[in-house]
Image (cartoon, grey):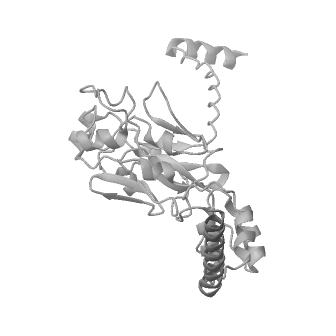
Amino acid sequence: MDSTILTTIAILTLVGIVVAVVLYFVAQKFKVEEDERIDKVEACLPGANCGGCGSAGCRDFACKLVAAPEIGSLFCPVGGNDVMQKVAQVLGQEVVAQKKMVAVVRCNGTCENRPKTNDYDGYASCKVKAALYSGDTGCRWGCLGCGDCVAACKFGAISMDAATGLPVVDESKCTGCGACASACPRTIIELRTLGPKDRKVVVLCSSKDKGAVARKACKAACIGCAKCQKVCPFGAITVENNLAYIDFNLCKLCTKCVAECPTGAIHKFNFPEKPAAPAAAPAAPVEKAAPAAVKAEVKAKEETA
């Protein structure tokens, strides 16, 4: 009995050793050599795994960077230019600094501007609500207000304003990863570069309805009148499908369109407040003309003097 157990143990041990040796040689034959620079590049990345670079994660992005003959078209929005400079040093390449991008909510359908027409009593998700019906208001293009964008942001850069019912972006925290834009079923969140001193001018509307319909649903809607397009001296504004859009690459921040918009759909951000105009000086009193008789008497006294 004891010899049977020992024999079984010996056989199993021998089989295990043989299998281990076979697996070792198979692994050696089919192993994939990995560039050691991948680990170095990954160490430079922030490790957020947000997908803002278009990759599955930081490791996948590091592999793309190492494999790319030129990394100028690849960018880590979370790490920004500082991280890309470190990656370029590891890979022995050069990169051109890119402008910071931030998320912009192109909707101004506040509770005041866009009153509710019905109440949604289902699962609190913009994606679910968009799949079921057009929304709580007469506008079928604007924000649905359930905060899918807030849940998608890993950096706490976006929150819901209880007073307006709209998302608010904290530009100091926004990394431009685009997760909120991807989460929005209405595609009203856009990534835009900031101008000098972080200024920007944006049409806060996404409605493609005709002017009367859009205006009825929201007091601050773009009505497609094209007045902003006509007044823009730089050709930065186009009007398509009853909606104006400002190209941030062409906009020079003159703000003429802001003053021209009849519905207030165009907003400017981070501009300084204009100082109040000084009060006008009181006008000097105007002397009334003397009657003709008085003038004649004065003239006579002067001649006799």
Nearer to us in this view, 284 or 42 = 42
Please give the count of numbered marks on the rendered protein: 0
Q: Judge left or right: residue 208 versus residue 233.
A: left
Q: Judge left or right: residue 229 versus residue 255.
A: left
Q: Where is residue 208 in the image (x, y as percent from the top left)?
A: 27, 50
Quadrant in which residue 170 is drawn:
top right
Please tell me whether residue 63 is drawn above or below residue 186 in the rendered image.
below
Identify the residue at image location x=35%, y=30%: 113
Identify the residue at image location x=47%, y=43%: 149
Q: In this orientation, does residue 72 appear?
A: no
Please tell me whether residue 64 is drawn above or below residue 189 in the rendered image.
below
- Residue at far bottom of view: 29
Q: Position of residue 86 (x, y in %)?
A: 76, 68
Q: Where is residue 93 in the image (x, y as percent from the top left)?
A: 73, 80
Quadrant occupied by the C terminus: top right
Please tell me whether residue 68 is drawn above or below residue 111 in the rendered image.
below
Nearer to us in this view, 222 or 92 = 92
Identify the residue at image location x=62%, y=18%: 299
Quadrant occupied by the N terminus: bottom right
Identify the residue at image location x=45%, y=61%: 236
Q: Judge left or right: residue 50 versus residue 129.
A: right
Nearer to us in this view, 259 or 7 = 7
Nearer to us in this view, 139 or 144 = 144
Q: Where is residue 248 in the image (x, y as percent from the top left)?
A: 51, 58
Q: In this orientation, does residue 118 appear?
A: yes
Quadrant in which residue 72 is drawn:
bottom right
